[in-house]
Image (cartoon, grey):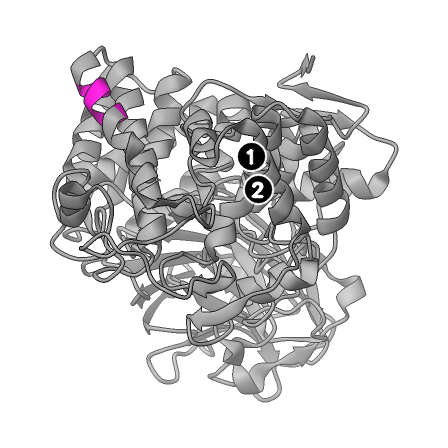
Amino acid sequence: MKYLTYVNARMGTRSVPRRSNGNTLPLTQMPFGMAPFCLQTDGGSAPWFYQPDHEYAEGVRLTHQPCPWLGDYGTVLMTPQNDLVMNDYAPAWSGYRIGDSVQDPDYLRVTFLRSGCTFELTPTERCAAIRLSFDNDRASFLSFLPVQGSYEYRYDAENAILYGVISGQKTDIAVNFKTYIAVRFVPAEVDAARTYDPNGSCMHIALTGRTLEARMGISYISGEMALAAIDRECGDLSFEEIRRAAANAWEEKLSRIEIESDDEMQMKTFYSCLYRVFSFPRKAYEIDRDGNTCHYRPADGKVRAGVRYTDNGFWDTYRTVYPLYTLIARDEFAEMLEGFVGDYRECGWLPRWITMGECGCMPSTLIDSVIAEAATSGIASPALLREALEGMLKHANNPAPEGRFGRNGIVEYLKYGYVPRDMYRESVNLTLDFAYGDWCIATVARALGEEDLAEAYELRAKNYRHLFDPESGFMRGRDCEGRMAKNFDPCVWGGEYTEGSAWQSSFAVPHDVEGLAALYGGRDKLIEKLDALFAEKPHYRVLGYGTEIHEMTEMALVDFGQMAISNQPSFHLPFMYAALGCPEKTDYWTEKLVREAFAPTEDGYPGDEDNGTTSAWYVLATLGLYRLCPGKDEWIRSKRLVKSAKLLGREME
C-alpha cells in the first residue's frame, strides 16, 4: 500500500469535553461506509467512549456517532469473555497493549488480555468480517452487550445466525427507527446448547473451541436486508480477501491526491486528514436482493427507493469538504446531493444537520452553499437543481413548523432585512448566513436561466450591510427598532454570535468581499482590520454563553490571535488577504497554520475536526488552494507546501 500506511486513524482522538484535539474516533470502515467500528475503552464517558491512552478496553463497538456533541445511534458492543461472563460492559473490561493493537481504516486488531482473545475485524460498506482467536481452552463466548437504547436478539441455531434489533436514537427526528444486525457464524464453531440470552438485552455466543469466525451485516430496514448485505458484500470471500478489498478501496480514494514531500510527518498528516475527508457523510441506503437501492425514511418510518446519506452538518462542512469533492469526488458528490434533495422530497425541508434524521443543531441553511457549489461545478442535473431550488426558496421565505428545520428568524429577516437581536440569539450569524444563502439561491437560479429570480436574490444578498457598525468596524446585531447594544466588546462570545465573537464573525461575507471592503473604506482598510485580528491577543469573554465553551479554550491555547483556526468561522480569514491583493500575507499565515496547528498524532487537530471539514482545510491549504466563496467558480491560490501534487493523476500547475 502506497498511501494507506501513512494514515493514523487515531489522529485527534485525545479529546475531552473541555478540550478538543479533534473529537475524532479511530474508525475502521469503508469510505463513506454505513458500518463503522471502533474500540470502546470507557462507555461510562458516554460520547467520549474512546481514549487513546487507556490501556483497557470494553469491546469493539459498532458506532454511527458523527461527533460527540450529537452522540451515537444504532450501536452495539462485541466483547470476548470467559471465566466470569458479564451482561454489562462496565465490569467486562480488560487490559490491552496499545502498542500491539492495530486501529486502521481497513483493519482492527486488539488482544483482550483478560480473556486471552485476539479480536480482528475488517469492513465492507454495510458489513464486517470478524475473527476471534483465544490462547486458552477455557469456555469462551463472544458477547453482544447493550450500549444505549433497547435490544432484542434471536439466535437461529439451525443456520447459526444471530439476529438483533436495536431501538432508539439521540436528538434527531426518526419515526420508529431501528438498526437491524445479522451475524452469520461457522456452525461448527458455535455451541448452540450453551449460547444464551440472559436478560433480553444481550446475547452470549458460545464457542466450541478456540476460534470463531463471523460475518456481520447491518440494515435500517430489516434483518433480512442485513443478511442480504452479508451475501452480497461478503459472499464466500475469506477474511483476508475482504481485508484486501477494504485496503484497496482506501488506497483508491487516498491516491486521488498524490503528494511528494521529504517530510514524513507531513505525509502522515496529509493522508490522515484525507482519510477523514472520505469518512463522512455516510451511506444510509441499502441494496435489495434485486439490486435496487432503497432506504429507511425518517419522516414516517417507511422504506423508499433511492439513495440517502447521513451524519453531516452543513454549517461545518460546506466551507471545505464539498469544494474539495468537486476536485476529487465528483460522482460521490452527485450521489450525496441526490440523497440530500431526497430528504426535501420526503419531509418537506432541505436538511441542516442530519444524523439519522434531522437534528438541526446549528443555525442557518448552509445546504444552500452545497447546492450552489454543485450547480457551479456542473455536478447536478438541471432537474435535480430545479427541485433543490424549490427547497431553497421554501426555507428562504417560509417559517418552518419547528426550529430544527429551515431558517430560524426568516419572517423577521424578510421584514427588517436582518434578524433582530432582541428576538433571536446568534442574530448576526443568522443574518450573514441568510445573506450568503440568498446569494447561493441567485447562483442556482442563474445556472437554470432564471435571471429575474437571480437578480432579486442578489439584491437580498446585500442585507449583510444592515449590521455593519462603521464606528467599531464590526458586524453587530440590531433590535427591532434598529438599535445596537451599548457597551460593546468585540471579545464577548455568544449572544449575537455563533461559537465566536465579533472578531471571528464579522468577515462572513464570502460572496461580496469587495462590498465588505467598501464598508471599511476600501481594500487597504479591510486589510488593516485583518492585520488587527491576527495581531490581537486571543482574549475572550464568556458573557454571551454564561460559561466557557471549548472553542474559546482552543482559540487561546492555539494562539493565532483572534484567528481561531480551531473552528470553522475563521477558516477563510487568511485567504481574504489574497482576495484583497496581498497574497504574501495569505502565504505567510497558511503556512504557519499548517505547520504549527496540525500533526499526525492523537492531539493533532487545533479543535473539532467535524466530519472532514478541518481535515479538508488542511488538505486544501497544503495544496495551495481555497474556495473563498463556495458556489463561485474561483479558487484562491496560495503557496503550495509540498514539492509536487497530482489530482486524479494530473500534475497541479
Residue under the point 47% across and 59% down: 67
| Left or right placement of residue 455 versus residue 62 in this view | left
**What's the magenta bit mostly, secondary-structure-wise?**
helix
| Left or right placement of residue 208 versus residue 396 in this view | right
x, y percentage for residue 257?
A: 66, 26
Picture mark count: 2
x, y percentage for residue 82?
A: 61, 81
x, y percentage for residue 519?
A: 42, 34
Q: Which residue is mark 1?
A: 525
| Tag 1: amino acid | Lys
Q: Circle 2 — which element?
A: helix
Between 159 and 501, which is closer to the camera in this rendering? 501
Q: Is residue 307 visible?
A: no
Quadrant assignment for the C terminus? top right
The image quadrant that residue 342 belongs to is: top left
Residue under the point 66% across and 79% down: 94
Q: Which residue is mark 2?
A: 529
Q: Circle 1 — which element?
A: helix
* Crowd class of label 2 (few under 14; some 14 to 19; many from 20; radius 10 Å): some
